[in-house]
Amino acid sequence: MGPTGSGKSELALTLAERFGGEILNCDSVQVYRHFEIGTAKLPLSERRGVPHHLLDCVDPDELFTAGDYSRLGRSVLAGIAARQRLPIVCGGTGFYLRALLDGLFEGPPRDEELRHRLLSREGARPGTMHRMLRRLDPKSASRIHANDTTKVLRALEVRLLTRRPISLLFQHGRNRLEGFRVLKLGLNPQRTELYERLDARCERMFTAPGIVEEVNGILALGFPAHSRPFESIGYAQALRVIRGEAAHRGAMDEAQRQTRQYAKRQWTWFRRESDLIWLDGFGAEAPVQERAVELTREFLART
């Protein structure tokens, strides 16, 4: 695990090749088909023959939740173990990782009428839902970005229907992953260098043919612009360019800023992970890879 752009995929590939592993994706946008450039999804030609799971498994207009990820991910883990291979979970979506390892409580089903009322208020006055969440469930509000309307909506829905904060979701989960021991490795590159790399990556994304052209192609396939993955960083800005709501340079600047902020939130989230071992540097750096291999070898020797 680690912030975006820290080299998680490269390190996962190195460990998979060294220990006979298969990789389970833990990125909430990479699960969607057709979303390549903005997610920094590793092309098939660069996966070095290592099997990858839960990549490109959902159409953009399909609903896919943390509960879905937990259920499918556990099935994948069981399959990898049955083949006597090493499961390697790789990605930066901490919410999905926690759902996979700790399980989820049985939350209330979706209430479409309540959702419609909340979204109508949000449409009339953007930011309304997050302000409401700050008042009703400040702990959850502090962990969910105001622009992530999907998570804000669900947190409000749970709070209003159960009168309990969604922050208790994992605390009351009684479905922890069984049958596996877990080694948690976190990449911790130097922040200034990471931000420079992220800015450069965003600039490449918006260089034609880039993310704007990719979004046009996805829309041409018939998927609506309100599909969930279009809310993610880079894609939201590309949509604004296509609609004439933002200039190309301004959209790129906004994507760069939001990407840096997202990396900071990922660091904050992962620092709350118990038993996590931080590796100082990027995943492609030889000292980081050597340390990760050493830790993995020691971990497996204790089986």
Image (spheres, rainbow, N blue to C red):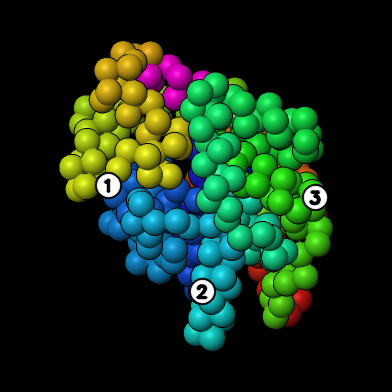
Are the residues at dot 3 and dot 2 in contact (C-beta closer than 8 Å)? Answer: no
Residue hosting label 1: 223
At 66% across and 68% down in the image, what residue appears? 297
- State which region is magenta: 251-257
Q: Earlier in the sequence, mark 1 or mark 2?
A: 2
The vertical placement of 154 against 25, above or below, is: above
Quadrant in which the C terminus appears: bottom right
Q: Earlier in the sequence, mark 3 or mark 2?
A: 2
Kindly identify which residue carries mark 2: 76
Amino acid at circle 1: Phe
- Sort mark 3 into few (<14), some (14-19) or many (20+) by Cα contacts within 10 Å: some
In which image quadrant can residue 209 be found? top left
Q: Which mark is residue 103?
A: none
The earlier-in-sequence mark between 3 and 1 is: 3
Which residue occupies 44% across, 63% down?
54
Residue 20 % position (x, y): 50, 73
Q: Give residue 88's quadrant in the image.
A: bottom right
Q: Residues within 10 Å of mark 2 (few under 14, many from 20)?
A: some
For label 1, count other residues whose C-alpha is less than 10 Å away and answer few (under 14), some (14-19) or many (20+). Answer: some
How far apart marks 3 and 2 lie (CA) works out to 32 Å
Image quarter of residue 67: bottom right
Query: What is the total number of numbered labels drawn onto the structure image?
Result: 3
Could you tell me which secondary element the residue under label 2 belongs to?
Answer: helix
* 284 or 25: nearer the viewer: 25
